[in-house]
Amino acid sequence: MKYKDLRDFISFLESRGELRRVTEPVTWDLEITEICDRVVKSGGPALLFENVEGSNIPVLINMYGSERRMAWALGSESLDDLVGRVKDLLGLMQGPPQGIMDKLRSLGQLMKMASYQPKVVKNAPCQEVVVEGAGVDLNRFPILKCWPEDAGRYITLPLVITKDPVTGVRNVGTYRIQVFDGRTCGMHWQTHKVGTQHYRASQEGGLGRLDVAVALGGDPASIWTGSAPLPPNMDEMMAAGFLRGEAVEMVKAKTVDLEVPAHAEIVLEGYVTPGDERVEGPFGDHTGYYSMADVYPVFHVTCVTHRRDPIYPTTIVGRPPMEDYYMGKVTERIFLPIIQMVLPEVVDMNMPAEGVFHNLVIVSVKKEYPGQARKVIHGLWGLGLMTLAKAIIAVDHSVNVHDLSEVAWRVTNNLDASRDIFFATGPVDDLDHASPTPKFGSKVGIDATAKGPGEGYHRGWPPDIVMSGEMKALVDAKWSRYGL
């Protein structure tokens, strides 16, 4: 499955019965959110609102709102297929090839990887219409106000593009943007994100301004990649090329020194200036609570380019599960093999919807020595944005981490509170309202694995209650005769 742009994906979803067109007039002010919230939580389809009051631009929402649609968006029939492709790539990276045939295969794979690098083109659909200066007016787009106490209208599914002012390395991230007026916005760059690093570097270097471009739309793999916690120097557009099996076409922006996805629907060009900051928020966030007002950089929009008939892609966040849960579940599945390269004893991992990504991580561990589960928990806290995980629970390798009933049963049975619960302090997510100080607080690790003498347990761990295989087979054979 390959999609050139958002329109290709819309057509694909419609052909699979996974998209509904809504022609009834709706408003961007809360109504689309209430409709979409009901649809997401009932497992419904992607929605294309074709008649949004005050705009002639249709709104696409919930395109990622199921595991199946999420897999399709990244060019696979299932998440398992996608993970298999990632594992093949990691196998190529892990060691030298053995034998001539392996060498030839590796060479072919490396050449293929090179083909995923973004390709710059001269002309692009995203620049069919160019509006600069006083003509810029963001209010003509159907940007949503999502929740009653939101401070205003928010762009929620952007690709925010910046370059490191020192190294020139590009970053593409998904950060919410509050629309203040027709030409200025609040850029919600959280403390631990790469966009913030670029902003700080421009501030420290006294560079005056940092060019920013915001792309809305494009192929679905590229849009998703902005939310993936990739290493700081890995190009998201190259990763998107790998996922979609084809290089992402980029084009030079009209007024800033950046390249943008050529097949985006809408592109905002402009800048932030170090020290030019303003209160942004509140905003109904993915935690299910409002994140409160705080000071963030002001994004000045100096140019807007778009297709002649653009589509506005967006999403809503709030009390889970929401569309972003399915986006995050792909991240969990794709990054599990990468985590296993560093922590090979990790068998599986689950970041359930109720934990809103950073609040709860459940990991199963193949233990070979005392304290290994604690080692895994501390190791996870040292891996990138996993450092923000507020609670990590380790269970034995035989536990199905995706069965929350089994996890609760194992944890509550295996737990000795004074021995198995431990704490650490360090960075926490900007959205963590429970921490007494912003961005810094306490985290909890829970070792719910079976214990042995090496961990101070000398009683003999009890076996699980399991019926014998012979009796199971006998009852299976006689089941129809019981009259049950």
Image (tube, helix red, strand yellow):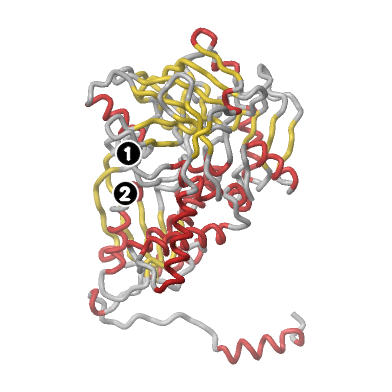
Q: Secondary structure at mark 1?
A: loop
Judging depth in this view, the residue of 265 and 150 nearest the camera is: 265
Position of residue 181 measured from the top left corner of the image (x, y, whole percent): 49, 14
Q: Residues within 10 Å of mark 2 (few under 14, many from 20)?
A: some
Position of residue 81 measured from the top left corner of the image (x, y, whole percent): 57, 60
Residue pointed to by mark 1: 192
Looking at the picture, does residue 55 appear above or below residue 92? above
- Name of the residue lying farthest toward the top: 134
Position of residue 67 measured from the top left corner of the image (x, y, whole percent): 59, 52
Looking at the picture, does residue 4 appear above or below residue 87? above
Sequence-first disc among 1 and 2:
1
Judging depth in this view, the residue of 317 and 450 nearest the camera is: 317
Residue pointed to by mark 2: 387
Work out how far the residue at label 1 is from the one at label 2, CA to CA, in angstroms: 10 Å
Q: Residue at x 73, y 43 (%)?
A: 14
Contact between labelled residues 2 and 1, with CB atoms less than 8 Å apart: yes
Position of residue 350 measured from the top left corner of the image (x, y, whole percent): 46, 58
| Residue 412 in view | no
Q: Amino acid at mark 1?
A: His
Q: Residue at x 65, y 22 (%)?
A: 308
